[in-house]
Image (spheres, rainbow, N blue to C red):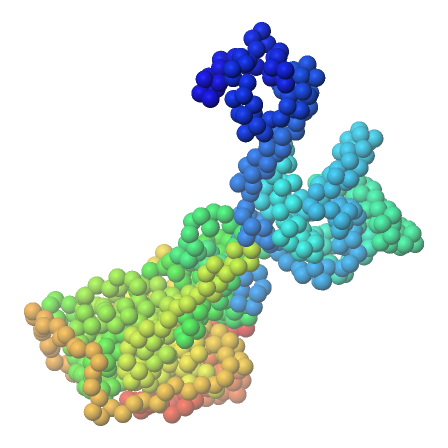
Amino acid sequence: MGKLTSWFKRKPTNLSDSGQGGTNESLPPAYMAQARQLLSKMKIFPSRMRTNQATGGKPLYRRIWFWAGLGVGSGIVALIYGISLIDRTLPDKAQLNAVLREQTLTIKAADGTILQQQGEATRQQLKLEQIPDNLKKAFIASEDRRFKQHNGVDPQGILRASLNNLRSQGVVEGGSTITQQLARILFLKQEQTIWRKLKEVRLAQKMEQELTKDQILERYLNLVYLGGGAYGVADAAWVYFSKSPDELSLAQMATIAGLAPAPSLYAPDKNPEAAKRRRDLVLLRMQEDKVITPEQRQAAVQEPLTLKSSLPKRVQVESPYFTSYIQKELPKYVSPNVLTSGGLVVETTLNPTWQKVAEEAVAKTLRNQGRWENFKQGAMVAIDPRSGEIKAMIGGKDFGKNQFNRVTQAQRQPGSTFKGFVYATAIASGKSPYDTYEDAPIVVDGYEPKNYGKNFHGSMNLLDALTRSINIIAVKVLIDVGFTPTIKLAHDMGIKSELKPTYSLALGSNEVNLLELTSAYGSFATQGLHTEPHGITRILNRQGKVIWSANFTSKRALDADSAAIMTWMLRNVVEAGTGGAAQLDNRPVAGKTGTSDEARDLWFIGYIPQMVTGVWLGNDDNHPTDGSSSSAAYTWHEFMEKAAEGMPVEKFPKRPKLEGRKGTIKAQSIKPKQVLNRSISDDDDSEGESSRNSNSEDSGSSKRRRSRRSYSQEEQQSSNSTPRRRRRDRSEESSSNHSSEKSSTSRRRSKRVESDSPSSSPPRRTRRSLSPPNSSGSSSSEPSWRDKLRPSQQ
């Protein structure tokens, strides 16, 4: 057998039953039996050898059927390979149900309204049932008359379009189906190449397998570009006719459907004649498809092309400071690759109603108080302290001129608002609100804190010291509790900025931003729990699937009893102290005012159980103002009064028992190297001066105020009249013109020099104070001359 095999390799032989071959050399007779045995095993029978002999013994490569079969087989293999190669470049199966274009971003408010869109985004996504039937049929008649029959690619449509284009000697009809166009919109670029067309065809076939016809049509009608910045039929109805789709006439629907092949060519606002011809063609096709009657077509053809153009809603940006903040927050929650690919929908926490109220409140303050108190900027942020959700954000006066966000980017000295953390540390360390300190001159390690007006009040408890915002006592409390516990508590409650261990920390010398300061005060409202402030609830990808959702958990920053005591003390600030302008008629309010050196920054951070809101007023160039923190408190009131409408009235927790309390924070008392205590001089402690100059908000502002115009003292004395009180005074002016000079003089003496100070008789005091005021004074409804010069609050 081995020899036979070797012989075959050496001499190809054509065998026959007679042993004769078609070669010069026959198989030797000695090997015939072995050859037959071998051929029998190989199942090559003599009959086949006879056929081969009858055909003349041609080799396979010389036969037509061989090459034909080889060509067909190679074509099939190449087709299969080509399809697999295309498929590797296409989106996977899970991505085929995308509902948004790439490179788009849509930011929505909490109620679903759109705040901002970027890229080729559709302003209004409609369900298929929300789109008029004639509008759907107009697009089918115009773009894909066999939409219901084909499986993504329509050979008949391609042939028909080719013939029509040849007749017209131009491109008058496309062969792409609606499914192919949707595939191109969602996944492909617009380059005119064979490779792109092959991918488009394959994508259309795959999409037909994954989506229903209704799903494909719905996506197409929401995404197709129709010129004028309009993406989808809802945008087009607005851009060209200022209507919603269900308000369009048949002629207007046909006009919009006719735009799809070439929006720039058939745009009715740019080329009305071409638009009318295209509209009439669409109407004709609708009649041919028996979608409309000849009478309907004739009436629509005769309808004049009347436009009422509007700017695309997608270019409008609502709440720009907030949306810019959201865009900066996105990288925290999704990867750069996801951001680059785009197609995201971001659902946010913003309450549009509250946002408008906040905008009005800040604008009103800047328009009125800002003019005569010499500040040009304001900011506000409102947060739900229980969830950390940002409900309103005003980052400044005019986003178009200055995109700097004063809620999140401006680092400013918080002034006396920081005292809330100092006193909270003291209460948590076990101190009582009734523990007393001496308000007297002190120099500690070369640092000399001063009260506003350089006056002193002698022995005061913590409650009164916080209510009247006494600087010297705040520094002494900080010395007792220590830098480290105070800084740690402030950070735990939400302050993220660096806090340096200096004595001036107690008076707010370390810069913070409004968002973190407001969020930190929210920890008082939630009985010591802090939740990270945030503006995003969910992020959805192109397929409408949630790829991130908010899951912020609350953390214990301060024990509940200490938080309740602080709220009780901060309520007194509003009801009997520096925050009187923030009072609400029907619900309790707690909060703290703050004024930095030379009134450069005017603050009020206040809260009710359901919401904490912070207000800042000042100038970007840090120029001193002539204002007071009561303007910030008044702005807070203007917002909260309307925002809280319809909100259930909730009470703060009752003040815990003070006897036998144990501290939850260990105080780390500071041991100064040198302390110089001085006695209170008779001049500093005179009764009249003390009653008139009761504020210790800022140590540096009195020097500046004493150098003002000659009437500055009169202005200071009347500053205690809060904006709400001033408004009420003016309304009663006609009935009080004959008030006695004695009454007017008495009233002026009762006013505080700086509005962050409590008055002897607090403004708009509607409830009994939690602690009695330290002095008394008379009041009158007649406004001062300064009040009469101030602009209207309306």
Q: Which residue, as the protein is rendered here, is positioned at the far right?
A: 295
Q: In the image, residue 419 lies at what x, y percent?
A: 27, 74
When the figure is inspected, residue 135 is found, relative to residue 465, above or below; the finding is above
Front in this rendered view, residue 187 or 665: 187
Residue at 72%, 51% (x, y): give it. 240
Give the percent coordinates (x, y) of residue 756.
Answer: 34, 76
Asked whether the viewer can see residue 550, the reply is: yes
As rendered, which of 643 and 366 lies closer to the eye? 643
Q: Where is residue 555 in the image (x, y as percent from the top left)?
A: 32, 73
User: Farthest residue in the top direction?
Assistant: 24
Q: How many labels does the image show?
A: 0
Q: In this view, does 69 lie to the left or right of 475?
A: right
Query: Does residue 522 lie above or below 78 as drawn?
Result: below
Q: Which residue is drawn at 46% across and 79% down?
A: 724
Where residue 267 appears, as percent x and y from the top left, is 73, 44
When the figure is inspected, residue 290 is found, relative to residue 627, above or below; the finding is above
Residue drawn 54% across the image and 48% down it: 92
Q: State which quadrant residue 622 falls in.
A: bottom left
Is 270 or 226 nearer to us in this picture? Answer: 226
Q: In this view, does 191 lie to the left or right of 305?
A: left
Left or right: where does residue 245 sit relative to residue 483? right
Task: Answer yes or no: is residue 356 visible.
Answer: no
Q: Quadrant of the C terminus?
A: bottom right
